[in-house]
Amino acid sequence: MDDPRTLGAVLHRQAVARGEAAFLVCDDERLTYADALAHSTRLAKALLAAGAGRGSHLAMLMPNGKGFAVAALAAARLGAVLVPLSTMSMAGELRDLLDRSDAEYLLAFAGYRAVSFVDRIGEAVGLDPYSPPPLLAPSAPTLRRVFFAGEHAFGLPQGLDPGWTLAGPLRDGADDALLEAAEADVAPSDDLVIVHTSGSTSAPKGVVHTHGALLDHLRTLNRMRSYGPGEILFSNSPFFWIGGFAYTLLGTLLAGATLVCSRAADPPRVLDVIERERPTMVNGYASSIAPLAADPGFPGRDLSSIRRGNLYPIMPEAVRPADPGLRPGLLGMTEGGSVVLAADHEDELPEEKRGSFGGPVPGLAARCVARDGGDAAPGEPGELWLRGPALMRGYHGRERHTTFDADGWLRTGDLVRVDADGHWYFLGRDDDVIKTSGANVSPAEVQDAILTATGLPSYVLGLPDPERGQIVAAVLVTPGAAPPLRAALAPILSAYKIPRAVRAVPASAVPLRSSGKADLSALRRLFDDD
């Protein structure tokens, strides 16, 4: 039997094959494969009644959990294009993402943790939640319908006009025949998702993946990591980024496995979930998991079920590598549908292969390209170029020739080297983008925010960090002391974009190259005593 190549078809098959097996466990929520089909059917019918369908751009502002999974599956079954939005986005960032993605519909929780999404979206697009629709916002001209749902600690605000909820569409949902017809029209070549990533300018880029290509790629990755039925994966990767959405959430659906996650902010509650659900694998961002291992109660926890993964601080000593640098790494990127360089094993490498990322994932061809455009010699640095069906279809709103060359190669901006045995090594970025805990940060965007908040020009750069890969640092050009940046930037930037290290220098002390541009290497040395 051929593998299904649309997300809806995958869900239908797994609901039959797995039924009451758990698909997703998030804190106290539990979603079986049968539940995922039933709940997404009800929501899909409501979305059809609201006017959504094949090709509609549907944005989602939700944290990890059952609500996100059901909404994504419902929209994908209609052929709508998902646009996951970061729950850390400030109002200006949301406005920009909604506009750039041409979002027509927005599904959002009323809030998350201490943030009211009703207020934030209202600020972003001028929405008055206490007056009836429609929404006609020049800042997001394609956006017509916004639907809020009460969830977790956030109920719907009193007085919210019911037109901003799904109460009506859920009541008047489409019938089975219309949903079946809509699902039958969805093709593997249809766009599935637009995931945003920052480039070397302040403008985010919307990476478009199709159903068939992304699902094929994730099946390959599942085979490489032996991820299948019976496995229980704990992950702390956010679903709104490619690692959480594709490698984690969709990868679990394809595998017929169980995904465990937590929205809790305090380590004991997260550890309670892990200990209770007994995952066999752990994957995600190790920098965010360190507080769990530092919790006073951690030594008494029974996490013996964990056999493999990359969240080393919480893994049992028997399966935790003595030297993580000798385990093959994973290089992922949004444009590549998550992982693009990997090994098909987790065995310890010899010392001379320290830092190896294995090789290109099947379905991708890779080149290490020198400055002259030819292939770099073994051991010499070059830019990573990728080509193949696993790559994105392109950037939303951009013509193909501005992204791929005439032979289909994508220049990634990542610096790599390849040794004589074919092992690939990641060296950093060939442009200014900062990679911190799996997220891309544009220096230009942060510099603009600093100028807006403080009136000071600045230079923003990445510094190596053993936990996060890089951290964001800023050099402010001022004759006095640096002002407190975190408080100034918190209202306008996501937390991960705010500089963790700050220096101040007068304009006369900014080191310059012969071109007149700032010498970033010299600026980095200002942080050598950190």
Image (spheres, rainbow, N blue to C red):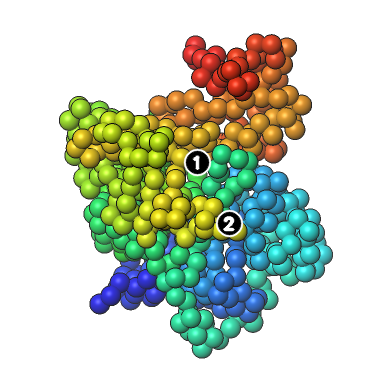
Q: Secondary structure at mark 2?
A: loop
Query: Can residue 305 be seen in the rendering of this structure?
Result: no
Q: Earlier in the sequence, mark 2 or mark 1?
A: 2
Q: Image point 55% across, 22% down: which residue?
A: 520
Residue matched to label 1: 439
Percent across and percent down for residue 388 are 36, 57
Instruction: Note whether 428 is above or below 248 in the view shown.
Output: above
Q: Quadrant of residue 54?
A: bottom right
Is 483 on the left or on the right of 74, as rendered? right
Local crowd size for mark 1, using a 10 Å CA cut-off: few (<14), some (14–19), many (≥20): some
- Could you tell me how far apart the alpha carbons at marks 2 and 1 are, in whole angstroms? 22 Å
Is 229 on the left or on the right of 106, as rendered? left
Is 148 on the left or on the right of 191, as rendered? right
Q: Quadrant of residue 165?
A: bottom right
Seen from the viewer's position, the closer of residues 355 and 395 is 395
Identify the mark at residue 398; answer none if there is no mark: 2
Q: Nearer the viewer, mark 2 or mark 1?
A: 2
Q: Are marks 2 and 1 in contact (CB under 8 Å)?
A: no
Local crowd size for mark 2, using a 10 Å CA cut-off: few (<14), some (14–19), many (≥20): few
Instruction: Note whether 265 is above or below 217 in the view shown.
Output: above
Q: Image point 58% across, 83% down: which residue?
A: 174
Percent across and percent down for residue 180 are 48, 84
Instruction: Note whether 349 is above or below 133 in the view shown.
Output: above
Query: Can residue 521 be seen in the rendering of this structure?
Result: yes
Percent across and percent down for residue 458 are 66, 24
